[in-house]
Image: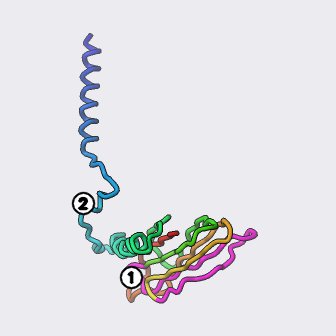
């Protein structure tokens, strides 16, 4: 009987704690995300390692793509870059893709170069017109294929050898 009473007390305590934890999670709706209830500071930290500046730079682009262009973003990546980075994606026939690359305040000139995997080799398709911290390339595949996007930090602001970037792919 004593073991059963202890078991019941432990079960009640566990359920009470679980109920408390679940009650702390705020249910979100499409109109109410976490960011709609908070204010964010997009400045860098003292060590200049924060992702917040590039996230702040990408946010207006994301809003423009979704709200003004009325298209769907299918991928967003953020990363640190010293010179070059690559990312891969399968692109499908019937879609017009845009690939946007944005550099943070440390990157003076960034570009994106698009390659397609054909016959066991990456064939160059085209580059963006990266003349500053922003570059864009478009692609409308004639068939499904694997693509490589090479991001190049072509020039940094004085005093910097690295920075953060964002790549946004939409259709």
Secondary structure of residue under mark 1 = loop
Residue at mark 1 to residue at mark 2: CA–CA distance: 30 Å
Quadrant of res 159: bottom left
**For mark 1, what is the residue?**
106
If you read the primary sequence from the N terminus, does the residue marked by circle 1 or circle 2 appear first? 2
Q: Position of residue 123 (x, y in %)?
A: 69, 76
Q: Where is residue 18 in the image (x, y as percent from the top left)?
A: 28, 36
Q: Which of 52 and 95 is in front in this view?
A: 95
Q: Above or below — where is 125 with respect to 26?
A: below
**For mark 2, what is the residue?**
37
Q: Left or right of 13: which side holds 81?
A: right
Residue at 58% from the left image edge and 79% from the top image edge: 113
Q: Left or right of 148: which side holds 26?
A: left
Q: Position of residue 21 (x, y in %)?
A: 26, 41
| Residue that protrudes farthest toward the right in the picture | 119
Few, some or many residues within 10 Å of mark 1 (<14, 14–19, 20+): many
Residue at 40% from the left image edge and 83% from the top image edge: 160
Q: What stretch is highlighted in magenta?
A: 103-131
Quadrant of res 108: bottom left
């Amino acid at each position: 009987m004593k073991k059963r009473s202890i078991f019941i007390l432990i079960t009640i305590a566990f359920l009470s704690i679980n109920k408390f934890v679940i009650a702390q999670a705020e249910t979100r709706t499409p109109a109410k995300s976490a960011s709609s209830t908070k204010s964010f500071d997009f400045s860098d930290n003292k060590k200049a390692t924060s992702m917040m500046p590039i996230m702040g730079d990408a946010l207006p682009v994301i809003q423009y793509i979704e709200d003004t262009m009325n298209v769907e973003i299918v991928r967003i990546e953020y990363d640190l870059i010293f010179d070059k980075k690559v990312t891969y994606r399968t692109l499908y026939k019937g879609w017009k893709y845009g690939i946007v690359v944005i550099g943070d305040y440390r990157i003076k000139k960034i570009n994106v170069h698009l390659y397609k995997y054909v016959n066991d080799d990456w064939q160059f398709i085209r580059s963006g017109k990266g003349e500053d911290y922003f570059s864009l390339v478009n692609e409308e595949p004639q068939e499904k294929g694997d693509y490589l996007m090479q991001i190049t930090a072509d020039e940094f602001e004085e005093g910097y050898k690295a920075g953060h970037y964002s790549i946004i792919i939409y259709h």
